[in-house]
Amino acid sequence: MAVWQTAAVSLRRYLRGFQPPVDDSVPTDAGSWPADELFWPAFLLSVGGSRTAAVAFDADPADVEAYAEKLHHPDSWPFITLRLASGYRLHVVFRNVGTDAGWDYLLQPAGTDMVVTLAALEGHFRGPAYSWRDLVSVAHQPDPTRSAAERLLLLLPAMGDAGLPADAERLIAAAFVAVGGRRRYRREVSRELLQASRRFWGARDPDASPDLMAMFAEARGPEH
């Protein structure tokens, strides 16, 4: 079964956890969207929390705002699936539901159609999902469809770490440039992304049950 089909099946249980349940037709496979020239400025602006991102790419800021609205339209919930170690999948879901809208990071164990919430941003906050070290390790896992830079930026909003290393901003800046950001904005955007993470989580380490942490450790695989 293709990855997007597996994700659609797995998300059914997640959708039925809402009241009223969300229809199965609402999730939209957005796996190809990161190739759109407007995706990264819109994602880093709206999900990442960088105001500068709207003007930091070769794109009209008005078009970026319109694309961000598309990402958050209540008629569809875009999701992007990332491959993890040991057959795990991680789904980044735009939870476009009324006053509880936000973004969910869902972990799907290998060989199951179950998903568990690693982090929920906005609405009922839950998280953070993983530390900076774990983020870098997961970002650099082999992936035939996503670069390490794309994976790092997609996963960054769910990261929380009370002791960020000195090179964190530099690595984010390099990822920003790798997805098309203009170099002269790299420090400002990377700084804003880390500031947004602190606003979401404060100076906190990952907050999860021992069972969930054990699952994520398996999905993370060997550290890089």
Image: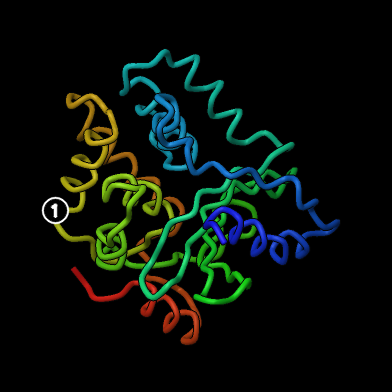
Image height of 123 relative to 131, above or below: above
Three-letter code for the amino acid on which mark 1 is drawn: Asp
- Quarter the C terminus occupies: bottom left
Direction front: furthest residue: 1
- Quarter the N terminus occupies: bottom right
Which quarter of the figure has residue 191?
top left
Disc 1 crowd rating (10 Å Cα; few below 14, some 14-19, many 20+) is: few
Which quarter of the figure has residue 177?
top left
Closest to the observer: 74 or 76? 76
Q: Residue at x 49, y 66 (%)?
A: 127
Q: Residue at x 27, y 28 (%)?
A: 181
Image height of 181 relative to 44, above or below: above
* Residue labelled with disc 1: 167
In the rendered image, residue 147, in percent from the top left (x then y), is placed at: 28, 47
Direction bottom: furthest residue: 210
Q: Residue at x 64, y 64 (%)?
A: 10
Q: How many marks?
A: 1
Judged left or right of residue 199, residue 30 is right
Residue 198 in sight: no
Question: Helix or strand or loop: what does disc 1 sit on?
Answer: loop
Closest to the observer: 220 or 110? 110
Image height of 215 relative to 126, above or below: below
Residue 64 in sight: yes
